[in-house]
Image: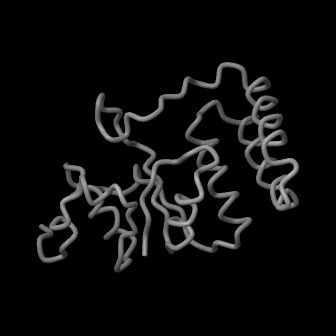
Amino acid sequence: MCAIHQPNLFPRLSTLAKLFAADRWIVLDDVQFARRDYQHRVRLAALDDPRRSRRTVELLVRQYYGRSRHWAAVPEVLEAVLNTLDTSDCVADVAKTSTIALLTALGWSGKVLDSSEIPTRQGRSERLADLAAATGGTHYLCGTGGKSYLDSGAFDLGVRT
């Protein structure tokens, strides 16, 4: 099974659950921003001051989760994210790191692939179908919203060219 998802900085539990259930996570690392399209949810500015970003992330995570009964699992995840903030000014790199660190802390042993490395057809549904097929998996795990914008026929292996 594969899941295809844009990287999120400290993703929601529903996203982690979807990724955890998959053998492969294809990171949508090359999605084009389209105004008024599905991915037009949040735009993050570049990390202008990595030291300030590092300190802000560290303080916010400690503030929100420091008293959690599961805090013992958080410092390792946080450290991975902070290390990436030290070495990259790309928000996507930091978001990908946070997701992988959380999945690793949960014991996930799947594989991560980048969509930019996999050739695909044009079209949203066709592209996702090609990405899913590239993993050799038999199932594509999609969030509940996918039913409203995906053409399930594109995922039928008999339709492939």
| Residue positioned most to the bottom | 138
Q: Check the image and report above or below for 108 versus 5.
A: below
Taking the spot 83% from the left edge, 34% from the top edge, the residue there is: 59
In the shown orientation, is residue 73 left or right of residue 33?
A: right
Which image quarter is the C terminus in? bottom left
Q: Relative to 87, does residue 148 appear above or below in the rendering? A: below
Left or right of residue 36: residue 16: right
Residue 35, percent from left and from top: 30, 28
Q: Residue at x 23, y 57 (%)?
A: 150
Location of residue 109 in the rendering, given as x and y in whole percent from the top left corner: 63, 74
Determine the residue positioned at 37% across, 42% down: 31
Residue 110 screen position, x and y as percent: 57, 72
| Quadrant of the rendered image containing residue 86 | top right
Q: Nearer the viewer, residue 159 or 74?
A: 74
Q: Position of residue 128 (x, y in %)?
A: 30, 58
Q: Is residue 81 left or right of residue 76?
A: left
